[in-house]
Image (cartoon, helix red, strand yellow):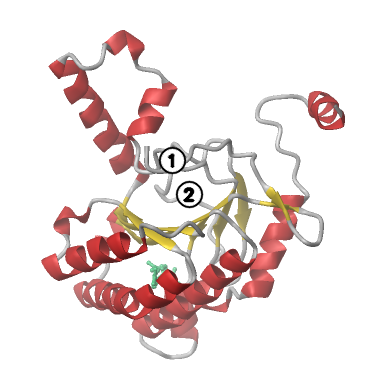
């Protein structure tokens, strides 16, 4: 197993006393509108959005957040105008090349999830290289979802499980939730504690469908390029106030916490 499996509720305590999520997952929405409001091409919004990525990654390092998963390009984003897709992928490639040294210096481990088979060889190689170079790091695990879809993830897990059953390595009667969990892209990574979507829409949009089962959801109208550290703090403060019951009653939780 690549990563230590932790319960979703394993959280550090921030300097201000609140609970800090171990894993934050973000849908970075609103780049296009941010640019359109300024009469700029949509790609200018993605460039501004990549600056926000830097700011939020730095904030996660400072706050000792264990995992940050960012939805950078969904399986559905291919439906965008060809030019926007190509500029967005170029931006991802250049950001990757520019940032990898800083990530290394800051102890960040980079990992990509999603179907990378469709990408150009140059992008695939840069992704693999960035993963290799940052592998030894033990700080923040930064997961970038690229050509990722929650349904794709479940389907690819099912294909692998079916092959294991076919080969006799696994018995169909032994398949349980853990088996499925172990074959998903986030296998071995704690489930997200906090999901943030910027840009005003209140949807999961085929992000981590299986893994978000017990995640606290936070939606904000702030557009991604405007989502700064202060806006992130507001999301973390909202998380710190929530009671996570995981199916138990409030009374039961108080008993456990008081014990
Ligand atoms: C959604 O905004 C955003 C995306 C599809 C791309 C996110 C990509 C970045 C922030 C670029 C850099 C990423 C990394 C990891 C370096 P939208 O275009 O759907 O905005 P809209 O809803 O206003 O049109």
Q: Residue furthest front?
A: 136
For ligand 1, which image quadrant applies? bottom left
Q: Quadrant of residue 44?
A: bottom left
- Whether residue 62 appears in this view of the structure is yes
- Whether residue 71 appears in this view of the structure is no
SS label for mark 2: loop
| Picture layout, residue 34 above or below residue 191 | below
* Lower position in the chain sequence, tag 1 or tag 2: 2
* Pointer 2 local density, CA inside 10 Å: few below 14, some 14–19, many at least 20: some
Q: Which residue is mark 2?
A: 204
Q: Which corner quadrant holds the N terminus?
A: top left
Q: Residue furthest right?
A: 258
* Pointer 1 local density, CA inside 10 Å: few below 14, some 14–19, many at least 20: some
Which residue sits at x=32%, y=35%?
A: 154
Q: Which corner quadrant holds the C terminus?
A: top right
> Percent x, y for residue 92?
31, 73
Q: Which residue is mark 1?
A: 209
Q: Quadrant of residue 238?
A: bottom right
Real-space CA distance between mark 1 and mark 2, rounded to the nearest whole angstrom: 8 Å
Check if mark 1's residue and mark 2's residue have beta carbons within 8 Å.
yes
> Percent x, y for residue 101?
37, 76
Which residue sits at x=40%, y=18%?
A: 176
SS label for mark 1: loop
Q: Nearer the viewer, mark 1 or mark 2?
A: 1
């Amino acid at each position: 197993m690549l990563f230590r499996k932790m319960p979703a509720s394993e959280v550090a305590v921030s300097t201000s006393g609140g609970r800090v999520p171990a894993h934050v997952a973000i849908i970075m929405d609103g780049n296009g509108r941010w640019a359109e409001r300024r009469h700029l091409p949509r790609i200018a919004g993605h460039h501004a959005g990549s600056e926000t990525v830097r700011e939020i990654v730095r904030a996660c390092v400072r706050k000792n957040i264990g995992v940050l998963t960012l939805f950078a390009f969904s399986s559905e984003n291919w439906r965008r105008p060809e030019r926007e897709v190509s500029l967005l992928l170029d931006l991802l490639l250049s950001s990757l090349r520019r940032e990898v040294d800083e990530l290394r210096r800051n102890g960040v481990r980079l990992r990509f999830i999603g179907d990378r088979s469709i990408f150009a060889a140059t992008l695939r190689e840069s992704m693999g290289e960035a993963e290799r170079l940052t592998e030894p790091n033990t700080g923040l695990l930064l997961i970038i979802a690229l050509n990722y879809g929650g349904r794709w993830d479940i389907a690819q897990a099912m294909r692998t499980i079916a092959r294991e059953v076919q080969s006799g390595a696994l018995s169909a009667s032994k398949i349980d939730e853990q088996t499925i969990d172990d074959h998903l892209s986030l296998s071995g990574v704690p489930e997200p504690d906090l999901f943030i979507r910027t840009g005003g829409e209140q949807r999961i949009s085929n992000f981590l469908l299986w893994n978000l089962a017990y995640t606290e959801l936070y939606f904000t109208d702030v557009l991604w390029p405007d989502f700064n550290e202060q806006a992130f703090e507001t999301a973390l403060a909202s998380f710190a106030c929530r009671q996570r019951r995981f199916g138990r009653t409030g009374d039961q939780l108080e008993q456990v916490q008081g014990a």
